[in-house]
Image: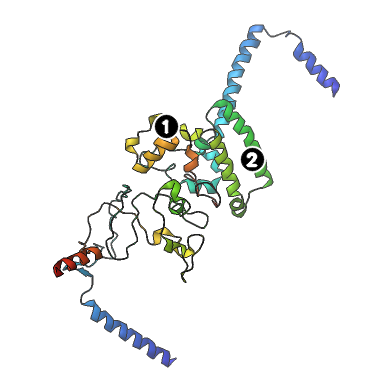
Amino acid sequence: MIELVKRYWRTISTPSKYFSLGFLSLGGFGMGIIFWGGFNTAMEFTNTEMFCTSCHENIYQELQSTIHYTNRSGVRAICSSCHVPHDWTDKMARKMQASKEVWAWVIGTIDTPEKFAARRRTLAEHEWHRLKANDSLECRNCHEFEYMDFTWQSARASHQHSTALASGEKTCIDCHKGIAHKLPDMTGVEGF
Amino acid sequence: MRNNTRVLLLLLATSFSAGIVFGEDSGYNEGGQTLATLRDAPISIEVTPPKMSRVENSDLKRKRAYPMQPPTIPHKIDSYQVDLKVNKCLSCHSRKRIEDSQAPMVSVTHYMDREGNFLADVSPRRYFCQQCHVTQIEAKPLLANDFVDIDELLSIESSAEH
């Protein structure tokens, strides 16, 4: 075993005997593009609605009756629009976290509707905390405060948005909970 | 067995005669206007549904249109969740939430059980808001409403006396 490692180390630490520097550097560059592209394509595939719903089908059905799925103008959000950061580094961090969720799927932590109902509040709280901590970043990727026209909002909405939201005292998720999914038991949650 | 049949026949006969008696002025009648049906086509034909109207969202309270009318909802309630787990309406209108929301509080009768005992939370029989309270649309009324509120009636009466 040790011999094998030593042999490989010798091969990769000695200069190339047959391949030119140009071939190796340009070839490496080319392969880099292909691998990087492939990596990102695979990563993007895990962001598609088809990929998410292959397991999370029940929750997808809940989304279908909400305004984030169907509306007058046809602009819509898919799972990853809200649940995965759009920034590359944050996205990688979230994807690594998700590997734990894959493990939970493998061992069947939540494999019945009853188990899901029992854990729903905990799972919802994870998302509320995440959005509270990043100032509802995933909401704001589309709903940009600077471009909100209060004159188009109802009296109540423009009042709340021009006071609590504008001052930074509240963030989107503080009021807009359960807008794309059904709510769990909200006993004790602030605002309910 | 025969007895049962007789009872059934008697019931049928009475219901038929009742139908004849009340059938003469079938349809809702008020102030000379009648509204026989809301369906414009025979039952065998599926009509094109009317265009959906926009729900009133002005936050302005309407006055009542008939005695004992539950107040109408003057705003949109799209996808408000009201079930065993959560009541979205009460997240603004409940007694403990009105200070933050400045929304009208549900009346104290909603915190009472059938026997008139006061409860800590909204009574289960009053939990489903939309059983009584409904949103409104800007639509042409099918019938004119000639309801006069009691205060107006009393003031007319008292002015007639003097």
Q: Residue A145 carries which label?
A: 1
Return the x and y of residue A134 as percentages of the image width and height: 54, 33
B115 sits to left or right of B33: right
Return the x and y of residue A28 as percentages of the image width and height: 63, 15
Amino acid type at mark 1 = Phe
Instruction: Identify the residue shown where x is 49% and y is 57%.
Output: B83
Q: Nearer the viewer, residue A57 or A87?
A: A87
Residue B133 is drawn in which quadrant? bottom left
Task: Give the residue at mark 2.
Answer: A101
Residue B149 visible, this angle: no
Split into 4 quadrants, where in the image is the N terminus of chain A? top right
Residue A101 visible, this angle: yes
Return the x and y of residue A175 as percentages of the image width and height: 47, 43
Instruction: Identify the residue shown where x is 22% and y is 68%.
Output: B36
Residue A166 is drawn in which quadrant? top left
Looking at the rendered structure, the secondary structure element under dot 1 is helix
Q: Residues within 10 Å of mark 2 (few under 14, many from 20)?
A: few
Instruction: Identify the residue shown where x is 22% and y is 55%.
Output: B140
Q: Residue B46 carries which label?
A: none
Q: Is residue A72 above or below residue A145?
A: below
Looking at the rendered structure, the secondary structure element under dot 2 is helix
Marks 2, 1 in one chain: yes
Q: Nearer the viewer, residue B86 or B93?
A: B93
Return the x and y of residue A39 as percentages of the image width and height: 60, 26
Amino acid type at mark 2 = Glu
Disc 2 to disc 1, C-alpha distance? 32 Å
Answer with mark 2 or mark 1, whichever residue precedes in sequence: 2
